[in-house]
Image (cartoon, rainbow, N blue to C red):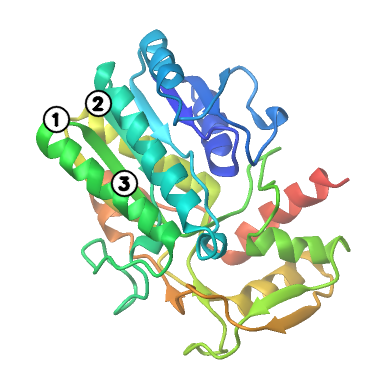
């Protein structure tokens, strides 16, 4: 297939691009490099530097590419930052994606896999979270993604636009030669591994008073390779005339911040110093995604479900990155 990957120079988009290339697909990467570098773009892809808010450029790209499908990873992703600057999240994540959708409609492209988030659910009423759970984000980041899902539903109803929205939370781990390299970095596992490498003094724990077994937040960690496989399955399902798919992507088991730190200590064999801080606004206590639906309907099965497996692949990449 010919696939356009927006945000394809990022961590997840870049991983997906590499895996799809290895499977023989033709990939075009579209990215504005606002949080990445040109060197992060996979070799043997067609690269276009630009913003999905640039209607003429994204429409030109679509017309010339005649793609079998689009995967949209282009977005700002920091929930904490969104609580300080909500306006840039609604402009970059919501309004810019509307421009992409308009360009797709104008050029006859009607198959999209959308990178959504479990942050759409907010503070869950029960866990694991199922796709029909209440949607009530606790931060503008989650709201900005949920607004896109609302737009997609109407595009589907009115225009017959086919889409799959994949809601996932903490993606981690690495494939051979490629892993997390956000600038600046804010994700828990690479920050912990920075401590193991001596690149920072400690890892901050934001809140020890949550209603969990050890007082720290619990999250569902999914290996980035497993996530990439889910995106391809979703795109293929759209070609089977399924017009609107919404799936959670996760392991179905949660790990607390302290458990993740202990995993890093086991895998690296190094001490990890911690600093306890106040809670961050907008952080739900527990987010664990139930993924039974995509397993039953698309046959997706995570192959790297153990936390130490995920940590080990991230550690291998992190050491190579800073060798």
Looking at the rendered structure, the secondary structure element under dot 3 is helix
* Residue 33 in view here: yes
**Residue 226 position within the rendered picture, expressed as x and y whole percent measured from the top left:** 48, 48
Q: Position of residue 299 (x, y in %)?
A: 30, 46
* Along the line of sight, the residue nearer the viewer: 306 or 264: 264
Q: Where, quadrant-wise, is the C terminus in this rendering?
A: top right
Q: Are marks 3 and 2 in contact (CB under 8 Å)?
A: no
Q: Residue at x 28, y 48 (%)?
A: 149
Task: Name the residue carrying label 3.
Answer: 148
Residue drawn 16% across the image and 37% down it: 156
Q: Are marks 2 and 1 in contact (CB under 8 Å)?
A: yes
Q: Where in the figure is residue 294, as x and y percent of width and height?
A: 29, 51
Relative side of 95 to 307, left or right:
left
Q: Which of marks 2 and 1 is in front?
A: 1
Q: Under tag 2, what secondary structure?
A: loop
- Mark 3 crowd level (few <14, some 14–19, many ≥20, 10 Å Cα): many
Question: Considering only order in the chain, which callout, 1 or 2, is on the residue closer to the N terminus?
Answer: 2
Q: In which quarter of the image is residue 158?
A: top left
307 in relation to 273, above or below: above
Reply above or below: 122 against 157: below
Give the distance between the C-alpha atoms of the residues marked 2 and 1, in whole angstroms: 9 Å
How many numbered circles are shown?
3
Please report contact status of discs 3 and 1: CB closer than 8 Å, yes or no: no
Q: Which residue is drawn at 57% across and 38% down?
A: 15
Classify the position of the N terminus by image quarter: top left
Is 253 in front, or is 283? 283
Q: Can residue 250 be seen in this view?
A: no
Q: Return the residue found at the far left.
A: 158
Of the numbered discs in the image, which one, if any, rests on residue 181? Answer: none
Disc 1 target residue: 159
For mark 2, what is the residue? 110
Distance from Cα at disc 3 to Cα at disc 2? 15 Å
């Amino acid at each position: 297939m010919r696939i356009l990957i927006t945000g394809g120079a990022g961590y997840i988009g870049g991983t997906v691009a590499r895996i799809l290339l290895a499977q023989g697909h033709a990939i075009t990467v579209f990215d504005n490099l606002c949080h990445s570098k040109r060197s992060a773009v996979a070799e043997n892809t067609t690269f276009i530097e630009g913003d999905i808010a640039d209607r003429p450029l994204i429409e030109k790209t679509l017309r010339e590419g005649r793609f079998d499908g689009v995967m949209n990873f282009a977005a700002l992703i920091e929930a904490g930052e969104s609580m300080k600057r909500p306006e840039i999240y609604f402009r970059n994540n919501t309004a810019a994606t509307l421009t992409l959708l308009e360009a797709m409609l104008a050029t006859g492209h009607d198959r999209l896999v959308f990178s959504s988030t479990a942050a759409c659910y907010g503070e869950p009423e029960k866990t694991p979270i199922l796709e029909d759970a209440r949607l009530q984000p606790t931060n503008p980041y989650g709201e900005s993604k949920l607004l896109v899902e609302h737009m997609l539903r109407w595009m589907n109803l009115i225009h017959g636009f086919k889409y799959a929205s994949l809601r996932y939370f903490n993606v981690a781990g690495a494939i051979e030669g490629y892993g997390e390299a956000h600038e600046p970095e804010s994700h828990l596992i690479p920050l912990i591994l920075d401590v193991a490498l001596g690149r920072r003094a400690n890892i901050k724990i934001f809140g020890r008073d949550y209603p969990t077994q050890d007082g720290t937040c619990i999250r569902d960690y999914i290996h980035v390779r497993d996530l990439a496989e889910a995106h391809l399955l979703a795109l293929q399902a759209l070609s089977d005339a399924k017009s609107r798919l919404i799936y959670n992507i996760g392991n179905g088991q949660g790990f607390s911040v302290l458990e993740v730190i202990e995993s890093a200590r086991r895998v690296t064999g190094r001490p990890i110093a911690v600093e306890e801080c106040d809670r961050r606004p907008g952080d739900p206590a527990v987010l664990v995604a139930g993924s039974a639906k995509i397993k039953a309907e698309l046959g997706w099965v995570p192959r790297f479900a153990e936390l130490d497996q995920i940590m080990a692949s991230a550690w291998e990449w992190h050491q190579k990155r800073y060798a």
